[in-house]
Image: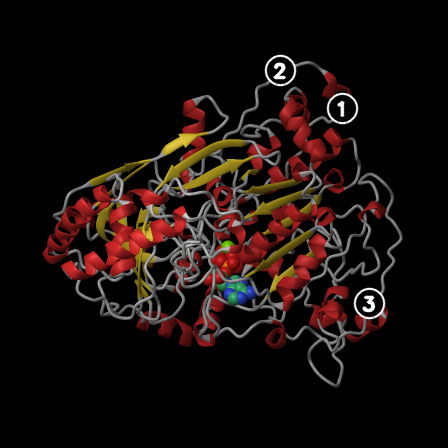
């Protein structure tokens, strides 16, 4: 069957390279290969890493090392841009690796894998006669409401305990919190903000009565009806292609690299995979290691960096030394021994040499000759986005797919094709051209037209994306200075098992939440946690007041839409009046204690509705696979959002974005910045120059050589999709 497919589609077949034995690589794509791009920017010198002498004897010498977790991706929010080098036109080279249609559809058992140094196993290849995947059928309609955003799975969980009225705190705990809708400090959706603080005295009295009634009921043990939050975080409806990857990873134990352009739901899928893997290994949670290339990306999925997981410090030494180092570190050694599945997010920033080192370390420490010591790899990222950070030496960074062991470790490469972020197919196509560095004149024109200022009829500005941290800080502090209100400072509470405060701070400095955040009324902020289905990581809003929980509770329940949204003087008067009214009542009922004030933020939804959220501290964790929380930060879930670094914006979905391409200097940066936008109407691009859209030629080669499953499977005459649905699709990978 496979031979037949190959015969029918000879162009789709490439010879595997650099592989000691055949492993299957299945690539599912519906995109035709783009022409080779013009390469530009700094030319990278690629070196192949020699793993050093790998005498096994040396593994047993006794050198003691501490666990040395260096996590620092501050450098990614680069301080100073590198000088821009004129683009050098490079001839497309032969790819270092070819992901090839040597599809091992029969092998579902990893135990069959041969040792790296073993002879080449017989390729046992069959190929199903399947029509190509129907993306249209597979994916849910792109016009459905997007119910979630980038955040770790725990953020979708309800808050730890239900809200009770402050003076009912002593009331007995609800026996089954899971079953209840859990309200948060959030107002219901409203289309129009009404006048604030317009509560009449009689209404207040009525409210007092109601509260007393509820209090009495509660004393009698009756259930107090809790205010219902309008909607819960919606369930996840994965598309068929996402489900296929999930199944291949969780049920079939495949080592997978899934990729796709920005907004194809890689992060959503990865969170779902992690959730399922955790469920699968719930009795042995340390079997699943969740890692990412950078501290920020790791923090976003509540994992650790790959360096931290490996216990290799900066990982500069040769493999034998690193192995010694790990063996002397009981915790790190155990991690290597216990791990069954290694999740790696944002792999585009993982250095290829590091990948090879880790692969060899895994085989040696685990004393297992299979690829990556038999560990199942679940890897995701988009190599057209940010590349590995150069390590400071003259050596240029090398992509993970250029690692010698990449092809042997990754059994299947799957390209997600349905773009969820941009519902407008024309805009999605423009971004895709940009991604591939192959921009047509009409697309250049269309991008140039986006230089006009954005015009929205609310108080929110577009978030400006900058390549460097200093530009971001300047832009945000200039805007803060223009605001006249009182400056409120929120300091994080940090904790964790790492006792060395400096080390812990260094880890936490990569966290999205800052140690200290200064806010004023009127400040534009971004929510950095998922709170409700419409208040998600990436939602942009404006601080309208600072208030304590009781004040918020009271007015949420009474008036709901009390904050006018623009932080003007009448709000202040209203707030003062409200406090006056609330105080005597509170004391009468047994003591509302006026606690700390938190920022009240008015978020404007894409449909124009407003939600108010009292932003109280949330937690960010850096957690090892065994559950040890190395570092934790509790902070209000906000950052200033007039400006954001491209590094911090990576992975985000933003409704209004402004990018000056004149400032962009790194490959992939322009694409990352522009692809955050959900629509052309919400994107302003200035100084658009095709030469600023820099794409690494090696990345283009890599993706060009991903062979479409459509190319090797002869479509059935009857239709373009898999006739028997998902099962067929899954069987094809
Ligand atoms: N199956 C799905 N159904 C509906 N919406 C989805 C689905 N998968 C992802 N989305 C939405 O699409 C948007 C982009 O998803 P996500 O951030 O996971 O993409 P990504 O591939 O990780 O993008 P990037 O490469 O930019 O990080 C998000 O708003 C997300 O909620
Ligand atoms: Mg993502």
Residue indicated by mark 2: 64
Q: Is residue 643 rendered to the left or right of residue 156?
A: left
Marks 2/3: CA–CA distance: 51 Å
Residue at 77% x, 71% y: name it: 10
Q: Nearer the viewer, residue 305 or 253?
A: 253
Marks 1/2: CA–CA distance: 19 Å
Secondary structure at badge 2 equals: loop
Secondary structure at badge 1 equals: loop
Residue indicated by mark 1: 55
Characterize the local packing of mark 3: few (<14), some (14-19) or many (20 or more) Cα atoms within 10 angstroms.
many
Characterize the local packing of mark 1: few (<14), some (14-19) or many (20 or more) Cα atoms within 10 angstroms.
few
Q: Is residue 485 rendered to the left or right of residue 286?
A: left
Residue indicated by mark 3: 127
Q: Is residue 254 rendered to the left or right of residue 615?
A: right
Secondary structure at badge 3 equals: loop
Q: Earlier in the sequence, mark 1 or mark 2?
A: 1
Residue at 68% x, 46% y: name it: 377
């Amino acid at each position: 069957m496979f031979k037949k497919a190959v015969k029918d589609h000879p162009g789709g077949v490439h010879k595997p390279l650099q592989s000691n034995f055949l492993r299957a690589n299945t690539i599912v794509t519906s995109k035709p290969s783009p022409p080779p791009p013009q390469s530009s920017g700094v030319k990278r010198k690629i070196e192949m890493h020699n793993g050093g002498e790998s005498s096994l004897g040396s593994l047993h010498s006794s050198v003691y090392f501490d666990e040395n977790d260096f996590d620092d991706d501050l450098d990614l929010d680069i301080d100073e841009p590198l000088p821009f080098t004129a683009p050098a036109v490079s001839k497309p080279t032969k790819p270092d690796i070819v992901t090839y249609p040597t599809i091992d559809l029969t092998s579902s058992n990893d135990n069959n894998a041969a040792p790296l140094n073993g002879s080449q196993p017989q390729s046992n290849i069959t190929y199903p006669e399947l029509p190509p995947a129907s993306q249209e059928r597979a994916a849910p309609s792109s016009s459905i409401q997007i119910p979630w955003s980038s955040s770790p799975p725990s953020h979708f969980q309800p808050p730890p305990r239900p809200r009770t009225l402050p003076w009912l705190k002593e009331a007995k705990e609800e026996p089954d919190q899971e079953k209840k809708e859990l309200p948060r400090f959030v107002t219901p959706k409203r289309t129009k903000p009404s006048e604030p603080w317009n509560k009449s005295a009689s209404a207040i009295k009525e409210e007092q009565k109601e509260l007393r009634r509820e209090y009495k009921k509660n004393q009698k043990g009756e259930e107090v009806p809790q205010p219902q939050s309008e909607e819960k975080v919606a369930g996840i409806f994965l598309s068929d292609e996402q489900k296929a990857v999930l199944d291949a990873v969780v049920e079939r134990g495949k080592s997978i690299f899934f990729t796709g352009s920005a907004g194809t739901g890689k992060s959503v899928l990865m969170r779902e995979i992690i959730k399922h893997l955790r469920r699968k290994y719930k009795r042995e949670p340390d079997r699943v290691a969740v890692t990412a290339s950078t501290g920020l990306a790791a923090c976003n999925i509540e994992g650790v960096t790959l360096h931290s997981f490996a216990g290799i410090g900066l990982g500069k030494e040769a493999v034998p030394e690193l192995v010694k180092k790990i063996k002397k570190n009981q915790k790190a050694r155990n991690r290597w021994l216990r791990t069954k599945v290694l999740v790696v997010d944002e792999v585009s920033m993982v250095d290829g040499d590091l990948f090879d080192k880790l692969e060899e370390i895994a085989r040696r420490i685990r004393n297992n000759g299979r690829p990556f010591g038999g560990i199942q790899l679940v890897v995701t990222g988009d190599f057209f986005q940010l590349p590995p950070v150069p390590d400071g030496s003259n050596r240029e960074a090398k992509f993970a797919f250029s690692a010698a062991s990449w092809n042997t470790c990754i059994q299947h490469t799957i390209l997600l094709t349905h773009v969820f972020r941009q519902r407008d197919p024309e805009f999605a196509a423009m971004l895709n051209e940009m991604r591939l560095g192959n921009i047509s004149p009409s697309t250049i024109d269309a991008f140039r037209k986006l230089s006009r200022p954005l015009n929205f009829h609310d108080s929110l500005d577009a978030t400006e994306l900058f390549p460097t941290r200093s530009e971001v800080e300047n832009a945000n502090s200039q805007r803060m200075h223009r605001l006249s209100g009182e400056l409120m400072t929120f300091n994080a509470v940090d904790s964790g098992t790492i006792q060395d405060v400096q080390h812990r701070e260094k880890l936490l400095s990569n966290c999205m939440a800052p140690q200290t955040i200064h806010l004023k009324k009127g400040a534009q902020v971004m929510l950095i946690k998922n709170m409700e289905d419409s208040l998600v990581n990436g939602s942009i809003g404006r601080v309208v007041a600072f208030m304590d929980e009781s004040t918020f509770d009271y007015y949420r329940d009474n008036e709901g839409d009390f904050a006018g949204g623009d932080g003007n003087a009448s709000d202040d008067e209203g707030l003062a009046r409200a406090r006056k009214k609330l105080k005597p009542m509170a004391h009468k009922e047994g003591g509302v204690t006026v606690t700390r004030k938190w920022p009240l933020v008015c978020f404007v939804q894409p449909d124009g509705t407003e939600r108010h959220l009292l932003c109280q501290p949330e937690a960010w964790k850096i957690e090892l696979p065994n559950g040890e929380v190395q570092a934790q930060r509790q902070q209000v879930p906000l950052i200033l959002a007039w400006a954001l670094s491209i590094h911090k914006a990576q992975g985000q979905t933003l409704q209004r974005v402004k990018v000056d391409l004149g400032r962009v200097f790194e490959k992939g940066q322009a694409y990352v910045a522009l692809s955050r936008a959900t629509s052309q109407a919400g994107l302003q691009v200035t100084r658009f120059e095709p030469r600023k859209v820099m794409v690494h030629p090696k990345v283009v080669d890599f993706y060009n050589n991903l062979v479409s499953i459509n190319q090797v499977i002869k479509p059935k005459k009857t239709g373009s999709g898999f006739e028997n649905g998902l099962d067929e699709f899954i069987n094809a990978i």
